[in-house]
Image: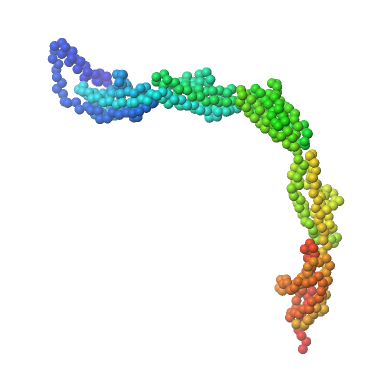
């Protein structure tokens, strides 16, 4: 390939040598050489130092091509594509590139293109996925250095990566708070710096109270903690200020009283703090949120009343329901229970815990049922023959007369608590008297009046 390319040059050199020796060179009597450069361009035409651009060309009937910069350096070697080709370049300053196309007869065609390089100096940026981590955790650094020709990564003054690349990332797990620095260098030796601080906090493995939860005021509570990597531990609260000695930093305990409120454990490492909070509240007495029983029921020795008692209690360790002087019933925090009474009864609900006892009472009035006595002047009549119905009641507050038609009760009249009423019917009829007591319970009596055909 090379010998084929150099034939025209050797011929020309030979001719020049012969001419210098006084020998007339033999003129080339071959066909005209149509070699041409159809296109030579750069993309992009403006870049920053450290960036790359692409030179591309199209030629016609060239035997080979050559690309050189304005310093005369030939680029790309002997393997450049001829008809259609491209070459990536990374100039450090504004550069003019020359494409030379050579024909078979030694004819040359030249084209030039200029790439402008913005050499304002490099810039550097660096960041961390997490700028605060616990001891033993990891974070990822990411950086870019546009306009630079080289970059290196440092942890403090220690070089982590001598050649960090102009863009990259690295997972790190520092043992102490560390400032990571990206140093980017430009073409003229100018530098740019960027840094990110990764704070390393100690780890609070546990922070608990014994006994836990709200306690009776004055109860002694032990606070226990375990830490990893801390160089100091403090307890802070409204009335609590404690600094653990060196031997109690990794694991320790301290006694306080219930009611101290919120206690904050502060663990530090190189000035970076981790915190955990416990609430030491005073135990309050139980709360009876609801206690529901009916105010009155209809009941007597011969007619007991059964109903449900419901309740809801919070904060209790023991809940007891007592019916009159009966045996205590132990309950859950929320529920209902069926009970039976024959007389007016007092129900008492009591809830207790170490902080105290609360209770509620409810009286269920047992209202005896109403009684009603009914008499008919005649229980058998002719059509439209008048008859009388009389009644008397005890413990009733309301009386009503109804008649049944096809098993449907139809109101006839609201009555007094006792009295007499004249009625007429055309056919056999069932009358119903209803008496209600103060609890709304009904007492019912029915009478039938039979209608017979009139005698001829």
Toward the bottom, the furthest residue is 456
In the image, residue 264 lies at what x, y percent?
68, 31
Dividing the picture into quadrants, the one containing residue 411 is: bottom right
- 246 horizontally vs 349: left or right: left
- 370 horizontally vs 15: left or right: right
Q: How is the image coloured?
A: rainbow
- Residue at (19%, 17%) from the top-left corner? 12
In the image, residue 347 lies at what x, y percent?
81, 52
**Residue 125 visible within the image:** yes
Quarter of the image for the C terminus: give it. Answer: bottom right
Which residue is more in the foreground, 290 or 242? 242
Quarter of the image for the N terminus: give it. Answer: top left
Which residue is more in the foreground, 1 or 308? 308
Which residue is more in the foreground, 172 or 133? 133
* Residue 191 higher or lower than 409, as above or below: above
Dividing the picture into quadrants, the one containing residue 35 is: top left
- Residue at (82%, 64%) from the top-left corner? 369
- 419 horizontally vs 152: left or right: right
* Residue 411 higher or lower than 296, as above or below: below
Toward the top, the furthest residue is 21
In the image, residue 70 lies at what x, y percent?
30, 21
**Residue 330 visible within the image:** no
In the image, residue 342 lies at what x, y percent?
84, 58
- Residue at (28%, 25%) from the top-left corner? 112
Dividing the picture into quadrants, the one containing residue 385 is: bottom right
- Residue at (80%, 43%) from the top-left corner? 357
């Amino acid at each position: 390939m090379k010998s084929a390319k150099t034939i025209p040059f050797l011929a020309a050199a030979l001719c020049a040598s012969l001419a210098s020796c006084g020998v007339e060179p033999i003129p080339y009597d071959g066909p005209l050489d149509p070699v041409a450069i159809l296109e030579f361009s750069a993309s992009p035409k403006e870049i920053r130092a450290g960036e790359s651009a692409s030179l591309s060309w199209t030629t016609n009937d060239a035997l080979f091509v050559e690309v050189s910069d304005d310093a005369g350096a030939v680029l790309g070697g002997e393997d450049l594509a001829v008809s259609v080709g491209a070459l990536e370049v990374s100039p450090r300053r504004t550069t003019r590139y020359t494409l030379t196309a050579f024909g078979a007869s030694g004819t040359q065609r030249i084209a030039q293109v200029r790439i402008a390089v913005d050499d304002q100096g490099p810039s550097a940026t660096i960041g961390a996925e997490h700028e605060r981590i616990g001891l033993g955790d990891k974070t990822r650094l990411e950086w870019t250095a546009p306009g630079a020709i080289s970059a290196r990564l440092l942890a403090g003054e220690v070089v982590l990566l001598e050649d960090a690349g102009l863009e990259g990332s690295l997972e790190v797990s520092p043992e102490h708070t560390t400032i990571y620095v990206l140093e980017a260098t430009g073409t003229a030796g100018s530098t740019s710096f960027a840094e990110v601080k990764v704070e390393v906090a100690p780890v609070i493995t546990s922070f608990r109270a014994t006994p836990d939860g709200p306690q009776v005021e004055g109860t002694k509570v032990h606070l226990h903690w375990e830490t990893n990597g801390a160089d100091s531990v403090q307890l802070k609260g409204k009335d609590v200020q404690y600094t653990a000695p060196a031997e109690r930093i990794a694991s320790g305990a301290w006694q306080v009283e219930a009611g101290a409120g919120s206690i904050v454990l502060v663990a530090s490492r190189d000035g970076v703090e981790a915190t955990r909070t416990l609430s030491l509240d005073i135990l309050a007495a139980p709360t009876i949120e609801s206690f529901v029983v009916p105010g009155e029921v209809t009941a007597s020795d011969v007619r007991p009343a059964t109903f449900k008692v419901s309740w809801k209690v919070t904060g209790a360790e023991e809940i007891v329901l007592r019916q009159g002087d009966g045996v205590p019933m132990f309950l859950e925090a929320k529920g209902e229970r069926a009970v039976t009474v024959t007389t007016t009864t007092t129900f008492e609900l009591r809830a207790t815990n170490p902080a105290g006892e609360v209770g509620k009472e409810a009286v269920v009035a047992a209202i005896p049922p109403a009684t009603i006595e009914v008499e008919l002047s005649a229980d058998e009549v002719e059509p439209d023959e008048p008859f009388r119905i009389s009644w008397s009641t005890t413990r009733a507050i309301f009386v009503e007369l109804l008649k049944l038609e096809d098993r449907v009760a139809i109101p006839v009249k609201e009555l007094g608590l006792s009295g007499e009423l004249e009625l007429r019917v055309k056919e056999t009829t069932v009358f119903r008297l209803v008496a209600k007591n103060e609890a709304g319970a009904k007492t019912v009596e029915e009478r039938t009046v039979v209608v017979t055909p009139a005698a001829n």
